[in-house]
Structures are given as structure tokens and as C-alpha cells.
Amino acid sequence: MVWAMGAKPTLTIPQLGAVVAGNALEFYDFLTFSFFAVQIGKAFFPVADDTIRLLAALATFGVGFATRPLGGLLIGPLADRLGRKPAMLFCFALMGASIAGLALTPSYARIGMAAPILAVLFRLLQGLALGGEVGPTTAFLLEAAPVEKRGLYVSLQHATQQVATLLSGLVGLTLANLLPDAALTDWGWRVAMMIGVAVVPFALVIRRRLPETLHVETAQPSTPLRGPLLRLALLGIAMIAGNTIATYTMNYMGIYAAHTLGLPPSQSFAANVTTGLCAATGCVIAGRLSDRVGRKPVMIGGTLALLLVGLPCFIVLTHWPTLPTLVLCSALMGFCLGLESPAILAALSESVPPQVRAGTLGIVYAVAVASFGGTAQFMVTWLIKLTGSPLAPAVYMSGALLVSLAGMALMRESAPIKAG
């Protein structure tokens, strides 16, 4: 289905839902690995030291980010030539295959070294799919949106990632309460992943019914490039670097609660649920607000808010490591994270012409996330072990947010209401 040349009818709710539901599903499984890193480490890495085993699992999680730039480099430009829809369909099918493969990989106790090798292989495929997904999906959302609602539509990209955090946390919380630790390590985390696999065929059918936005967008008057492309890419990497480190530090809260604070899994997963709910709410509010006041005020304000509350929240958690403080701190930091995220992606999307939008977005986003997001959880775990300080994640996140703020300050305003 292709819209008539130059026409842009309102996207229906089922069509919009197909895009954001697919994004949520892909991030659901990607985040599930992170949330169950302790259990997956026990399944694939027979190391006596708990911290070393967790680091090995997080390194396997991080290796999936290595192929993200490749996915952005290969699939993003294809979406600029062939269309957004075929690129999204391919990425979704690849993600479904890698989810199933990882969930069904036997443990080290059963097949030896083949187990971690297969786990790494499927993580690489997942990274390739996600690297290729972001550019076409974000371009689709921007191009399908009415001009006055671009920020709101693009905010759904981040909002559904946070909904995935919420859903994965709920699944983890349920399994942690229903299953003993041995069952959670043996097959509980596999169940969580297979929940994602179950909806893949249905989501593929829905995505096949999406309209194509590339030809409509290129039929409109071309948006001038706001600044040299290389400069824009570097600013984008700087902004996304701080955001992705903050995102994966927040996604680490469940592991942090269990491994560092000593809370049981049934309580530690509450951090993921709270973060997902509050961050998703913040994303939608920020997206709509950025349509009214501009992208820069929203992303700078959200980043400053997270910078101000991050370290105090971790200090409170280390002094009072209880479920109420975990929920409260996760809610506060999650909401601030949601406020900063959508405007970054909207500003980058609007600043790039449609003919190179999916490829540029995909590559910039993938490079930033691969370089900084993929290493974030490994780094904070290593820093805690190196320094012996449970405040290390907050310090690392704060430094990254300062870099992000510098990029935002140099970025030109792109919102139609503000841009000249």
C-alpha cells in the first residue's frame, strides 16, 4: 500500500499501533536478556565468582551492540531507496528468528562451549536487526505524522521502548514470585523470551498492511539540511551517548538491586516495572510538549532534571536499600529519563532530508548506542567492583549526561513552531 503522490492522510490507530507494537516487541526481548543477566550467566558461564559470571553475561549482552552499526549501515540506506516498510518487515523477521534461537539454546551443562558461542551468535543477529530497525521506524513515524504532531509521534519510539521495559519487568516479577531460584535459572528466563516469540507471526501480518511513507515524503518540498551532515552526526552521537548510557543504567536497576543492594529478585524486578511505567509517561508528555515549545528546551530540561536527581537517588538507595526507596527512586529517575529522550530523536529526524533520513538516523543511532549503551551495564558493574562504591553508576551516568548537554546546546532548533 502506497499513499497517493503528495498526499498524507491521517495514519489510523491500527497502522500506528503496528509500528510501535513491533518496536516494543523487539526491545522487550532485547531488554529481557539484560534483566535476566544473573540467571543467564549461571546457565552459560560455569564460573565460581558471581561478579565474573555476571560480567561474562553482560559482555554477551553487550556484544549484540557490536552489529548495530552494521545493521544501520546496511538496512538504513535500503529503506531510503526501497521504502520504510520492507526494511521494517525484514528486521522484524530477523529479530523473531534470533529470539527463538537464544531462548532454545541449551545450557553449558548440556552442550559445553557450544552454549556461550550460540548465545553470542544470536545476540549478534539481534543487534543487526535492531540496528536496522531504528532508522526506518523513526523515519516512518516522522513522515506519517501531521507537522504539528511530529514530536508526539516520534516520542512513541522511546515510549514503546519503555513499555517494553515495563512488560519485561512484569514478566520477570511474575516469574520471580512463582518460581524457585533453580527453576528461574534453568528455564524461567527462557519462558520470558518465548513470550516475545509467540506474537512475532501476528505482528508480521500487521506490518505487511502498513502504508509506505517514503514516496509521500519525497514528493513534498525538500527540507533543507540544517548544518553540515558530519557536524549533525557528531552532535547526534553526543546527545544519544548520554541518553543511552542513562537508559541502560536505568535498565540495570533490577540487577543493581539484586547484585549490589542485596534485594531478592521478587523485589528487584519492581525497579524495571516502575522505570518503564514512569519513563513511558514522561516520553509522551515530552513529545507533545516539544511540539508546542520546541525540541531544545524539552531535551535540555529533561537532561538537567535527570542530572540533578541521579546521584541523590543512588545515595538514598545505598543508605536505605528497601523496596519503597527502590520504587520511589526508579520512578523519579525514569520519569526524568522519559522527558529527555523523544526530543533528541525528533530533532535529529527533522534535521535530515528524507532521501537520506533512515540511513543517517540508523547509522548515528547505532554507533552511539553500540559504543556507549552496549558497554554501559558492563562498565557500571566493573566500576562498582573496581572502586567498591555503589555510587559508581550515578557518577558514570552524570558524566555522560554532561556530554549530552554540550551536544544539545550546539544543536539548532528544528521544531516547525520554532524553526525559521
Image (cartoon, rainbow, N blue to C red):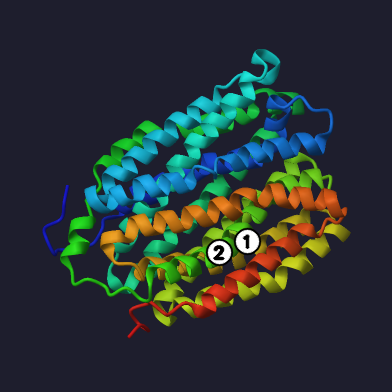
104 vs 6: above or below: above
* x then y, percent, for residue 409: 53, 80
Taking depth in this image into account, of 202 and 346 the one nearest to the observer is 346
Q: Is residue 409 left or right of residue 311?
A: left
Q: Residues within 10 Å of mark 1 (few under 14, many from 20)?
A: many
Residue wearing tag 2: 338
Q: Examine the image and state in which quarter residue 405 appears.
A: bottom right
Q: Examine the image and state in which quarter residue 321 appears.
A: bottom right
* x then y, percent, for residue 260: 82, 48
Residue wearing tag 1: 334
* x then y, percent, for residue 382: 77, 48
- Count of all numbered marks drawn on residues in the image: 2
Which residue is pictured at 62% across the width and 53% down the height?
Answer: 248
Question: Which kind of residue does numbered mark 2 sit on?
Answer: Gly
For label 1, the SS is helix
Real-space Cα distance between discs 2 and 1? 6 Å
Q: Is residue 385 left or right of residue 6?
A: right
Quick check: marks 2 and 1 in contact, CB under 8 Å? yes
* x then y, percent, for residue 331: 66, 61
Task: Say which quadrant the C terminus sits in.
Answer: bottom left
Question: Which kind of residue does numbered mark 1 sit on?
Answer: Gly
Look at the image and tell me whether residue 162 can be seen: no
